Image: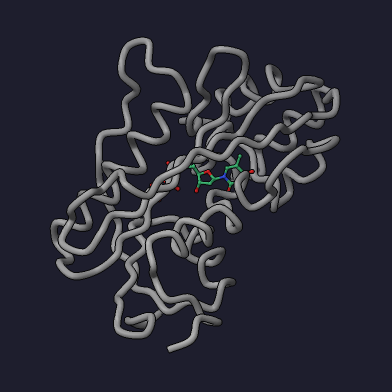
Amino acid sequence: MHTSVGQTRLVLASASPRRRELLGQLGLAFDVSAADIDETPHQGEAAPAYVLRLAREKARAVATRTPGAWVLAADTTVVLGEELLGKPHDEAEVREMMGRLSGRTHEVQTGVALAGPGGEHPGEYSTVVRTRVTFRPLSAGEIAWYARTGESLDKAGGYAIQGKGGFLVAGIEGSPTNVIGLPLGETLELLARAGVPLPWSKP
Ligand SMILES: Cc1cn([C@H]2C[C@H](O)[C@@H](COP(=O)(O)OP(=O)(O)OP(=O)(O)O)O2)c(=O)[nH]c1=O
């Protein structure tokens, strides 16, 4: 991927291949630079505050080392009742998560933040997008098979709606790209509000 939207450089602060692919679908030129931050939730932190804080911290971390660029970052978590489900550590945890999500509706929440050139006002352009996802009631065999696919371990909530995990899902309400890690419509709105030139903007 290569630099500059008009005269403005855009950097995606992410190591996620999904986010890179999704942002690429908008036809924007951008660079990628991963942010390495502590993703531990604060005591009692509500999900929307958590994903927003992490998105802002990722954007800010990369903005400090890329002066003059707009920096876009996101964080996605699965929220079941009051609980946050992050990335599972092993197959056993995937099975446990699938068992809990089975037959129920959860929310996927993504915080998106755009830090201004020079790193100033990192939270000025930010949003939280929420999508409701309902799982089919899953059999023990389906859960065991899915956990063995190995596609869960780097995904919040332990599943990939865009992958083999598509069969787990009975329905969704809201943005599909939000579930995969970057809500494209809302991201475009943030970029437009910030005045970042879009592919169809007049020069
Ligand atoms: C629920 C779900 C999550 N996911 C992914 C999106 C995110 O990449 C990941 C959640 O992890 P995040 O911590 O949001 O992101 P990341 O660690 O992959 O990348 P970075 O912080 O460098 O930007 O889960 C899917 O791809 N499909 C799904 O169906």
* 186 left or right, relative to 67: right
Residue placed at 32% from the left, 67% from the top? 11
Observer-nearest residue: 41 or 111? 111
Figure check: 164 above or below 168 = below
In this rendered view, identify the residue nearer to me: 36 or 70. Answer: 70
Q: Is residue 172 left or right of residue 19?
A: right
Residue 22 in percent (x, y) is at 56, 63
Q: Residue at x 39, y 36 (%)?
A: 52
Q: Quadrant of residue 81?
A: top right
Q: Quadrant of residue 172?
A: top right
Name the residue at 71% across, 19% down.
99
**Which residue is more in the foreground, 78 or 187?**
187
Q: Where is residue 73 drawn, in percent x and y?
A: 37, 52
Q: Nearer the viewer, residue 32 or 56?
A: 56
| Quadrant of the rendering where the N terminus is positioned | bottom left
Q: Position of residue 47 (x, y in %)?
A: 47, 24
* Residue 184 place in picture, x, y as percent: 58, 58
Quadrant of the frame with the C terminus: bottom left
Residue most extreme to the bottom: 203
